[in-house]
Image (tube, rainbow, N blue to C red):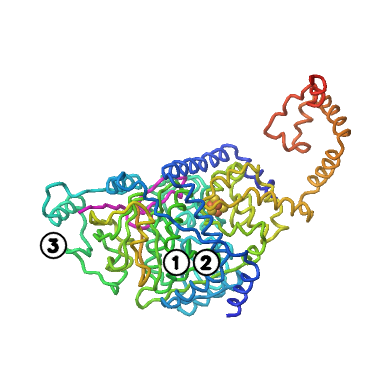
């Protein structure tokens, strides 16, 4: 407690006169000119992710999703999902033991907001069976609704409630590192791959 | 040792220096490509700068707001006046948990506080989980860059380290394979560890939450599996609102590595059910810096590293030549604040070209501050005797135009007749080590002007 008073006291003694807080605009003059879904897909590929849109005329998104998942991840044994996919999945809860989490091959989760400028997807705790799932899984699939796309981070944060946050992550592409000689390697500690489906 | 002595050591391997220079310039170019794609980037820099200025001017208010909201979220908030207090708080939390292993994601603050050796001395095993940090931890070296800690090492050197510590095949140097080996090794550590420590990129006052940005996902993996999360932050990390956070998430990764955003931008607001979250707010010299009008802007830094990647001196001298926790241009203005005597050579490790200030996402006037520190260093007399003598003589000559003219004439003649071996003797003229002297002109500008003026 002593240090708290000391630090705050020194700040009060040393801080400069008050400066105004700037108003942050939304930078959305280009509204309408940019196709957010298209831009998102472009950026996602740049950051190492893959991108699939529900084909025109496909009337059963769920069936399409399951078909695609089986095609893309034929070897995935332990699958976790917060969606009711109608395929065999493993039940994970916040109490699930680490040793079980470790074995997850594929996690299929709902992303709540998709940001076109940087291919980031907002994944709050409510969409995670356990906080570690999006990171510990070998491969991550995020499913996003067409209506959930925004242009930039200003718009995204406007949609995130300020109250009752617990934990949430913007995920843009798979886990990566360039710590060895600046060579980009996908799959550092987190998911080795990120696939996004738009439904 | 001074910066120039250490830089000289770094430069003994010419090829490696060139490689280092080019690697960092490559990152600078990636930064440019990312930045040019955002029309409003310069406006964002201005906003970033103003938000930080505003926050610093009400820092006490925002820290208290952050604390109150964090506590309401069930987070335990600690305050540490200096490095030692910070380290002691962290140790006490670990001890109370009954654990003896800590997984750690990147935190420059804990480097500054020398947390690792302190914990190890007290029986705690510390595992740095960022790949670059794990590499230099094996080597027992400090980071040479704040974003890419192992940028000074070649893949063959890293292969050797992994061979020794992780048992990988001798001679293996493929980055993909090395990263995979580290992934397997660190997964075991993640699974076992019950206490995780992270840094803080931003602390949001209105939500009481902290934000951590990584590409590897190591911070989340560690924290989400542990029972205790400790987050260490400097007092300057707080920002008022999520609207402000939006600006910084757009600036940080583009400036740092040319990515539109980091792979993971994680918002830790409440501890996971049944677990603990602690935030340690650290001063360690920052309030003193806040009291220095000429230098307080350095507290706006969001640790993106762009000023290092662009700096011609950093690129060719390496991060270790700064002998400070934060190297490069920003380190050269932060370090003298902490220990003027030890770091007196750092403000001179610059060409004052201003490239650092040009790329800085929060518009810190880095090169101006470097210049101002030089004034302070020269007044305090903390710089080398030969430089002081030279500056004194030069000062006196420049004050007297007639002497200046006469000396100039003599010097032009002398230079023409001085043998190369003498003018380039490294001991006498370090400037000429890798440079040729220009041909001395036959006459001075003043003489030419006298003749040609109509
Ligand atoms: S001073 Fe500016 S450019 Fe340098 S690390 Fe800090 S924020 Fe980045």
Crowdedness near tag 3: few (<14), some (14–19) or many (≥20) residues, C-alpha within 10 Å: few
Pick the residue in front: B228 or B366. B366
The question of residue A175 being in magenta is answered with yes
Instruction: Residue at 39%, 74% (x, y): give it.
Output: B227
Give residue B210's mark: 1
Q: Chain of mark 3?
A: A
Residue neighbourhood size for the residue with mark 1, other residues' Cα within 10 Å, grouped as few (<14), some (14–19), many (≥20): many
Instruction: Decide whether residue A186 is among the magenta residues.
Output: yes
Name the residue: 85% across, 33% down. B404
Q: Are marks 3 and 2 on the same chain?
A: no
Write down the region rendered in magenta: A173-199
For mark 1, give the secondary structure.
Answer: strand
Relative side of B19 to A51, left or right:
right
Q: Is mark 2 within 8 Å of ligand 1?
A: no
Is residue B1 found left or right of A138 in the rendered image?
A: right
Q: Nearer the viewer, residue B438 or B47?
A: B47
Labels 2 and 1 positioned on one and the same chain = yes
First-in-chain label (2 vs 1): 1
To which residue does mark 3 refer? A86
Rendered location of residue B298, percent (x, y): 60, 57
Determine the CA span between mark 3 and mark 1: 37 Å
Q: Chain of mark 2?
A: B
One can see residue B145 in this view = no
Which picture quadrant has residue A130?
Answer: bottom left
Front of the two marks 3 and 1: 1
Q: Which residue is mark 2?
A: B233
Instruction: Tell me the tag on residue B406.
Output: none
């Amino acid at each position: 407690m002593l240090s708290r008073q000391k630090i705050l006291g020194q700040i009060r003694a040393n801080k400069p006169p008050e400066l105004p807080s700037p108003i942050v605009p939304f930078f959305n003059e280009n509204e309408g000119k940019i196709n957010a879904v298209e831009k998102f897909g472009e950026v996602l590929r740049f950051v190492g992710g893959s991108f699939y849109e529900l084909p025109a005329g496909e009337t059963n998104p769920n069936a399409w999703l399951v078909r695609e998942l089986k095609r893309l991840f034929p070897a995935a044994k332990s699958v976790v999902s917060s969606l009711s996919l109608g395929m065999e999945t493993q039940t994970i809860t916040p109490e699930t033991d680490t040793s079980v989490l470790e074995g997850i091959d594929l996690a299929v989760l709902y992303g709540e907001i998709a940001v076109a400028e940087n291919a980031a997807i907002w994944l709050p705790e409510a969409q995670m069976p356990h906080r570690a799932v999006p990171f510990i899984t070998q491969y991550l699939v995020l499913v996003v609704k067409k209506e959930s796309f925004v242009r930039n981070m200003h718009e995204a944060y406007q949609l995130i409630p300020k109250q009752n946050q617990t934990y949430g992550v913007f995920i843009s592409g798979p886990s990566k590192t360039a710590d060895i000689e600046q060579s980009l390697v996908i799959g550092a500690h987190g998911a080795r791959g990120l696939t996004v489906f738009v439904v | 040792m001074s910066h120039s002595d250490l830089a000289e050591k770094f430069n003994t391997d010419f090829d490696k220096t060139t490689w280092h220079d080019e690697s960092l310039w490559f990152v600078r170019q990636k930064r440019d490509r990312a930045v040019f794609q955002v029309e409003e980037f310069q406006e964002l820099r201005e906003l970033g700068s103003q938000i930080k200025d505003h926050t610093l001017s009400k820092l006490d208010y925002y820290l208290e707001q952050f604390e109150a909201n964090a506590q309401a979220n069930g987070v335990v908030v600690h305050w540490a006046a200096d490095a030692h207090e910070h380290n002691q708080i962290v140790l006490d939390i670990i001890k109370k948990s009954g654990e003896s292993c800590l997984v750690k994601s990147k935190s420059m603050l804990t480097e500054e506080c020398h947390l690792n050796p302190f914990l190890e001395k007290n029986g705690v095993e510390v595992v740095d989980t960022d790949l670059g940090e794990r590499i230099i931890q094996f080597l027992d070296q400090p980071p040479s860059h704040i974003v890419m800690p192992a940028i000074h090492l070649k893949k063959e050197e890293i292969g050797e380290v992994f061979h020794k510590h992780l048992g990988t095949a001798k001679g293996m140097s493929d980055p993909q394979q090395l990263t995979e080996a580290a992934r397997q090794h660190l997964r075991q550590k993640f699974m076992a560890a019950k206490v995780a420590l992270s840094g803080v990129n931003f602390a949001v006052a209105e939500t009481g939450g902290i934000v951590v940005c990584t590409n590897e996902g190591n911070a989340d993996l560690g924290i989400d599996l542990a029972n205790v999360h400790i987050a260490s932050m400097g007092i300057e990390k707080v920002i008022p609102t999520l609207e402000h956070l939006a600006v910084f998430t757009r600036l940080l990764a583009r400036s740092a590595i040319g990515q539109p955003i980091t792979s993971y931008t994680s918002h830790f607001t409440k501890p996971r059910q049944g677990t603990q979250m602690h935030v340690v707010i650290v001063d360690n010299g920052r309030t003193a810096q806040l009291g220095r009008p000429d230098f307080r802007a350095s507290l706006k830094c969001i640790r993106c590293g762009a000023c290092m990647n662009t700096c011609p001196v950093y690129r060719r001298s390496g991060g270790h030549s700064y002998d400070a926790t934060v190297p490069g241009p920003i380190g050269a203005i932060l370090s003298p604040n902490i220990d003027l005597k030890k770091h007196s050579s750092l403000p001179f490790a610059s060409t004052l070209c201003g490239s650092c200030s040009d790329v800085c996402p929060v518009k810190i006037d880095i090169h101006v501050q470097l210049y101002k520190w030089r004034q302070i260093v020269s007044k305090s007399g903390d710089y080398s005797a030969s430089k002081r003598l030279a500056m004194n003589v030069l000062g006196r000559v420049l004050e007297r135009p007639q002497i200046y003219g006469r000396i100039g004439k003599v010097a032009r003649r002398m230079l023409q007749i001085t043998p190369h071996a003498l003018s380039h003797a490294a001991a006498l003229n370090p400037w000429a080590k890798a440079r040729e002297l220009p041909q001395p002109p036959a006459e001075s500008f003043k003489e030419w002007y006298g003749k040609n003026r109509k």
